[in-house]
Image (cartoon, rainbow, N blue to C red):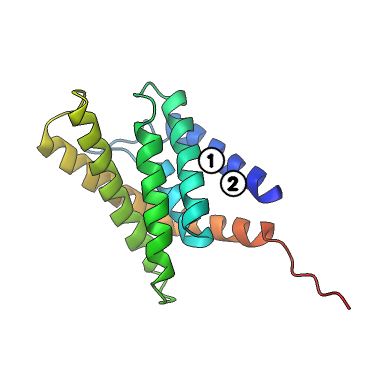
Amino acid sequence: MRRGIAWTAVIITALLLQSTIFAQVKLGGAKPELMYLITVVLAMLEGPSVGAIGGFTAGMGQDFLLDQPKGITALTLTLVGYVVGMVRQYIVTPSPVLPVVLVGAATAAGTLFYGLVEYLLGQGSELAFLVRTSLLSALYNAVLTPIFFPILRRLAEATRAKKVYRW
């Protein structure tokens, strides 16, 4: 229960940051995608099922908060959370660069998938712009990962249930 409330607060805070402060920070038409960052970190720390649920929640929150087609972001973040959670189970390196690489790659793949679905629905933009903004958003998220990852990891560790030993 406490974990769900804590992660919900993180998602709401990230939604507010993304729609206010980070909406003004654009480079080449791209902005940081905090929902992808949160979803990837959640999937890395908690696994595929929690990553998918967190991605769906973050995606629906973003869809309803911002003026976007409903459900595309939720679908994209659900898939990103699940895939990153599954991939993370097979990677056993303790490298501090791993979260940066995973966040960057997942953001690029997720935003490309989002753009492809939008294009198929007749709402997307041209391919060159989509690729450029996806790569720039991935770069933004990769730069922000060393700032947000330690905070989110500590939150995850603090809300984990303590193991109780009974005699």
Q: Is residue 29 visible?
A: no
Residue 53 visible here? yes
- The extreme top residue here reads 67
Q: State the mark number for residue 68.
A: none
Where residue 140 appears, x then y in whole percent? 32, 48
Residue 48's spot in the image, x, y percent? Answer: 46, 57
Q: Is residue 47 left or right of residue 139?
A: right
Which sits in the foreground, 76 or 139? Answer: 76
Whole-percent x and y of residue 104?
31, 55
Residue 21 occupies quadrant: top left
Q: Residue type at mark 1? A: Ile
**Residue at numbered disc 1:** 11
Give the quadrant of residue 128: top left
Q: Position of residue 83 (x, y in %)?
A: 37, 56
- The residue singled out by tag 2 in the image is 7
Instruction: Verify CB contact (< 8 Å) between mark 1 and mark 2.
Output: yes
In the rendered image, the vertical position of residue 125 relative to residue 137, given as above or below: above
How many tags in the picture?
2
Viewer-closest of 49 and 57: 49
